[in-house]
Amino acid sequence: MRPIGFAAVAKFLLPALLFTAPATFASEDIPDQYPQSLLYAKPVEIIPGVWSAIGATAPPGYENSGHNNNLSFIVTGDGVVVINGSAAYLLAKALHDEIKVVTDQPVKLVVNENGQGHAMLGNSYWAEIGVPILAHVEAAEEFDDRSAQILATMQRYNKEKADKTTLQGPSETFEDEKLIEMGRFKIEIRNLGPAHSPGDIAVWLPEQKLVIAGDMAFHERMLPIFDDTDTAAWLESWENFEALGAHYVIPGHGHPTNMDQVRRYTKDYLVYLRGKIQEHLDNGGELDKAYYVDQSPYAHLDTYEQLATRNAGRVFEQMEFE
């Protein structure tokens, strides 16, 4: 008998989860919620046919096996679409083992949500078993440029859990959107514009009003700003994200929630931080003090200690020349 999934109690539990979704719902202090698997947490059914193994909100490490993002899959009735190749060969295999508990339908496609290690390093497993892999062209280029460094970093923290992981990019790329009809699902894979990293995509299910947002949207952990993250462009892309009209959001990190919650901790955070940095610039402030602008309204988020000062410094360096 299949275990009772999230959908079985959705009409009672889902409204509470999606419309309250406190930031304390996840904790980076929990090293592993599913010790019998390399997965950080067992997959749960968010709505009928859509599942996600929610990753840790902590940085990737040996204890969470690099599973610090969400590994989702759609059971369409005519095959399975997996969103994210995962951070390692063995982690991808662990996800596949869970998929085979849920359904006997074959995995027909893997979608990489960006070019980061936890999206693509597990591609080697999926390629080995003959599954096509899709990514945005910019994500493929990002992975190609940095893949050796990404793999070496994962091998250092993951030790023997990195075994059998080799570099494998996507087998197919796209630029704006890729439309897929499989079984009872219409799946729109979209690049909504620049966001967290090159080639970020969102997987939109228009009939279900659910978006697997990838790193367009954060809420339980602080979003990271990279050297190549354009925060002004991210805010522009956010308008395209809002225009989807999603009722349900599976973010790149953290539990399923709603648009109000991810807006509060993504768009509103970017607006807030850029405002603080602009005040600092208007007062003649320099980089050394920019690191310490007040971000206390967001101090409760996981990874705040690791990211807040770094985010402020990077936004200062961007805005200094805008």
Image: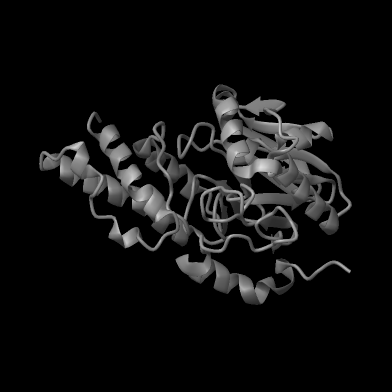
Q: Is residue 120 above or below residue 265?
A: above
Residue furthest to the bottom in view is: 12
Q: In this view, does 13 lie above or below 189?
A: below
Look at 78% across and 45% down and name the residue there. 93
Look at 68% across and 38% down and name the residue there. 111
182 horizontally vs 144: left or right: right
Residue 57 seen in the figure: yes
Q: Where is residue 284 in the image (x, y as percent from the top left)?
A: 11, 38
Residue 234, picture quadrant = top left
Camera-side residue of 1 and 94: 94
Color encoding of the figure: one colour
309 horizontally vs 166: left or right: left
Residue 21 seen in the figure: no
289 horizontally vs 42: left or right: left
Q: Is residue 164 above or below residue 268?
A: above
Q: Position of residue 231 (x, y in %)?
A: 36, 39
Q: Where is residue 170 in the image (x, y as percent from the top left)?
A: 68, 28
Q: Where is residue 296 in the image (x, y as percent from the top left)?
A: 29, 60
Residue 233, picture quadrant = top left
Look at 62% across and 37% down and name the residue there. 155
Q: In which quarter of the image is the C terminus?
A: top left
Q: In which quarter of the image is the N terminus?
A: bottom right
Q: In this view, does 233 lie above or below 265?
A: above
Camera-side residue of 26 and 211: 26
